[in-house]
Image: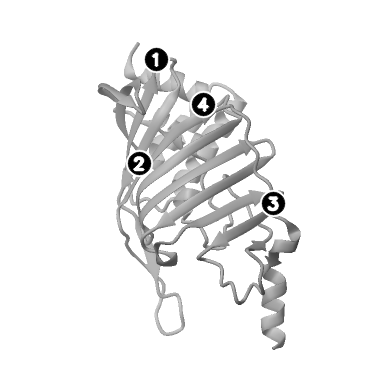
């Protein structure tokens, strides 16, 4: 099997994922070193994550859940005094796992972690230079390591070459998530595939861009951002996942809190 065929087979297998538990490590622009463990379900789309980031929230732990169009947050991002004794705050409408325009975590998550990792793992199918690096182990499981580069142009071409409507829609999702990560040009992507032809891990590396200004005193300017180097490991695939909203009596609504601040 060629590297291109092996990657295509792994991507096809990922398209059948309905639930996933996964781990994220690496460096994310403006967030520093990031560690997270998360569980997600695709129908309905729900996600629960426990996260630490050296560049945000004093490096303290944060728990985020997306359920029924709302986001729930617990941890050092929440001011306990402002929450009036509640442990969580909620915000809506909120969305996770979609694309650049639909995702909304109110800045609680970096844009790179707002994306669906199953969709992100499929981006390597758009590479024109996929090669086999070697055989390694991922959490003790043998896996073949592939590497390639991905561009926006390559993702557009992969979309146009999709064999059917479903594949085209999935590649549109990949293109949208690529755009949402603020990548500056080329993405270097590594993919580890197990003997069962399923994705075990992927890594994304790229320069990024950001912006400054956009005020009356300073015009908007696009500038170089910090590098992205993020690794996602698939832990449990298609196993039962439960992500629930926290108790209502322990949750403060962010909209209500904002209304109170405006009237004080």
In front here: 108 or 64?
A: 64
Q: Are marks 4 and 3 in contact (CB under 8 Å)?
A: no
Dot 1: element: loop
Residue at numbered disc 3: 245
Residue 238, quarter of the rendered image: top right
Residue at numbered disc 2: 204
Dot 4: element: helix
Precedes in sequence: disc 3 or disc 1:
1
Q: Left or right of 97: which side holds 155? A: left
Point out residue 214 in the picture as x, y percentages from the top left corner.
45, 75
Q: Which mark is residue 195?
A: 1
Q: CA distance from mark 2 to mark 1?
A: 22 Å
Point out residue 76 in the picture as x, y percentages from the top left corner.
50, 65
Point out residue 118 in the picture as x, y percentages from the top left corner.
51, 34
Q: Are marks 2 and 1 in contact (CB under 8 Å)?
A: no
Precedes in sequence: disc 2 or disc 4:
4
Q: As displayed, is residue 216 above or below residue 230?
A: below
Residue plotted at (41% across, 27% down)? 200
Precedes in sequence: disc 4 or disc 1:
4
Residue 86 seen in this snapshot: yes
Residue at numbered disc 4: 14
Q: As displayed, is residue 197 above or below residue 178?
A: above
Dot 2: element: strand
Dot 3: element: loop
Q: Residue furthest top?
A: 1
Q: Nearer the viewer, mark 3 or mark 1?
A: 3
């Amino acid at each position: 099997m060629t590297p291109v065929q092996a990657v295509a087979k792994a991507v096809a297998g990922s398209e059948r994922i309905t639930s996933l538990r996964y781990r994220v490590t690496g460096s994310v622009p403006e967030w520093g070193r990031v560690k997270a463990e998360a569980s997600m379900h695709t129908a309905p789309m729900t996600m629960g994550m426990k996260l630490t980031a050296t560049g945000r929230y004093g490096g303290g732990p944060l728990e985020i859940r997306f359920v029924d169009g709302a986001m729930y947050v617990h941890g050092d991002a929440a001011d306990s005094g402002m929450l009036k004794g509640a442990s969580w705050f909620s915000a809506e409408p909120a969305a996770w796992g979609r694309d650049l325009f639909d995702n909304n975590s109110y800045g609680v998550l970096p844009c790179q972690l707002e994306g669906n990792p199953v969709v992100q793992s499929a981006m390597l199918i758009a590479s024109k230079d996929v090669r086999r690096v070697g055989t390694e182990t991922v959490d003790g499981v043998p896996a073949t390591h592939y590497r390639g580069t991905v561009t926006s142009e390559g993702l557009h071409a992969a979309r146009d070459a999709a064999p059917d409507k479903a594949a085209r829609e999935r590649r549109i999702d990949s293109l949208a998530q690529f755009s949402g990560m603020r990548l500056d040009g080329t993405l270097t992507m590594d993919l580890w595939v197990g003997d069962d032809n399923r994705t075990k891990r992927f890594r994304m590396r790229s320069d990024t861009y950001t912006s400054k200004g956009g005020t009356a005193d300073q015009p908007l300017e696009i500038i170089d951002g910090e590098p992205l180097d993020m690794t996602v490991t698939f832990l449990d695939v298609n196993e039962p996942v439960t992500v629930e909203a926290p108790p209502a009596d322990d949750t403060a609504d962010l909209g209500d809190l904002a209304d109170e601040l405006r009237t004080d």
